[in-house]
Image: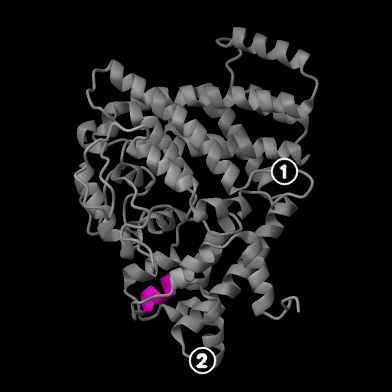
Amino acid sequence: MNWNQLLSVKRLGKPSSGTINAESRTEFQRDYDRLIFSSPFRRLQNKTQVFPLPGSVFVHNRLTHSLEVASVGRSLGNMLSLHLNKAGIAHPLINEIGSVVAASCLAHDMGNPPFGHSGEDAIKEFFRNGQGREMIGDLSQAEKADLTLFDGNANAFRLLTHQFNGRRKGGYALTYTMLASIVKYPYESSLAVKPKFGFFQSEKIFFAEIAEELGLIQNQAEGLSFTRHPLVYLVEAADDICYQIMDIEDAHKLRILSSEETKELYLNFFDRQADLAKLKKIENTLDQVTDRNEQIAYLRAGVIGLLVNNCIGAYIENEEAIMAGKFNGQLMKAISPVASQAMGNVIEVSVNRVYCHPSVIEIELAGYKIISTLLQHFADAALNNSPYGKKLMKLFPEQYLQQKPDRNSKIQSVVDFVSGMTDLYALELYRKITGMNLPAL
């Protein structure tokens, strides 16, 4: 792969020449602006990240998380631009890599359903073992896999590229480079690993078009599979840094972890011998700052800076393999031994103390029930012409009304609707259609 082909301002659905405009806003900055003003991005403010949406203590939601990931991603992208400039890579868009990565980071969670990762699991389970299993009986194996292995990453690609009812061709008409940079798993569901995949059958043709234009390397597989766009590694690293490190700070604010425990988890990222001067500076600052939350925020900022430097170093060290499509894994797996050990401690505490906290489990259980019920009612209504179903479809947004008569398209339109809901709207609609609440008279 080469940067002359990997960086393109051509937009999906638009017959543009791909020329670079010397305007006040570059094409990649337009991507960023288009996303941040979009309704799906705005709805992230009412979608759970890890902890239930806040009462008196404000913790992260999908919106604040995405903004923070975009900030870290821009730093990583700018650092890569500096490296490529020093290496003599001549391309007018090299300096715009930070904007590409920031825009991709904004979009990386836009396809995630309500109620955190349990929302994804609820959709999978509904079609794998729930009432949705019979509904997809006549679909192809590939179409079934899209639903039984439902993935928020693939759903984000669909959200950004699919022509919904009444909308323009190409979805949000974003640049090829930005769209390729959000696809962490550039293969279809039949080739899913972990299991993760990057696009549904309905958007398969779009990714193939993008991959060909950008020169992504196609893997030798029975299905459609490519190597990652190099910038995916930076988007993934920004996400990994933010959610792991910020979840610990949230746990401290909610008093799941003590101040001393949290300080120790963050200080472990610094080498006690090589980082003596830095540790001394940290100690002096902590002596001056007495507010516990501010102390933790200061340490968290230092850890993020350290991990950004580690990740860009890992990218440069593995640059040849990345550009050849032979680098397997994450940049966070290639950081320094000290930082890697500290991250291992953070993950262990998160799994054993944070993610299993009753407040987290409760929202996951509620999410399962709410999402499976909504899918059951609306999928049945979309597929069957019952009197109840006709009334229920009156609540269906026009943009999701499916013009295609096939079963898969109808089911996908229901998944589009449910996965795009906020936590609050999903809960309210669940209560209304099950008769638990009645509209105010």
Residue 105 vertical placement versus 203 (above, below): above
Is 73 on the left or on the right of 178, as rendered?
right
Tell me the amino acid under the disc marked 1.
Phe
Q: Earlier in the sequence, mark 2 or mark 1?
A: 1
Image disc number at residue 28: none
Q: Pinpoint residue 84: horizontal percent, then vertical percent.
A: 30, 22
Color style of the picture: one colour
* Residue that label 2 marks: 386
Q: Could you tell me which residue is drawn at 52 percent across and 60 percent down?
A: 120
| Residue 416 in sight here | yes
Q: CA distance from mark 2 to mark 1?
A: 44 Å
At 33% from the left and 39% from the top, the residue drawn is: 27
Residues shaded magenta: 407-413
Relative horizontal placement of residue 227, taking residue 74 as reference (left or right): left
Check contact, mark 2 vs mark 1: CB within 8 A.
Answer: no
Is residue 426 one of those drawn in magenta?
A: no
Say if 7 sits above or below 137 in the image. Answer: above
Q: Position of residue 403 (x, y in %)?
A: 36, 77
Quadrant housing the N terminus: top left
Q: Look at the image and tell me whether residue 48 can be seen.
A: no
Q: Image quarter for residue 305?
A: top right
In the rendered image, which quarter contains the C terminus? Answer: bottom right
Which amino acid lies under the numbered mark 2 shown in the image of this protein?
Answer: Ser
Residue occupying the far front of the picture: 23
In the image, residue 354 above or below residue 414 = above
Asked whether 346 or 146 is in front, the reply is 146
Q: Give the class, few, some or many, for how many residues have Cα within 10 Å of label 2's Cα (few <14, many ≥20).
A: few
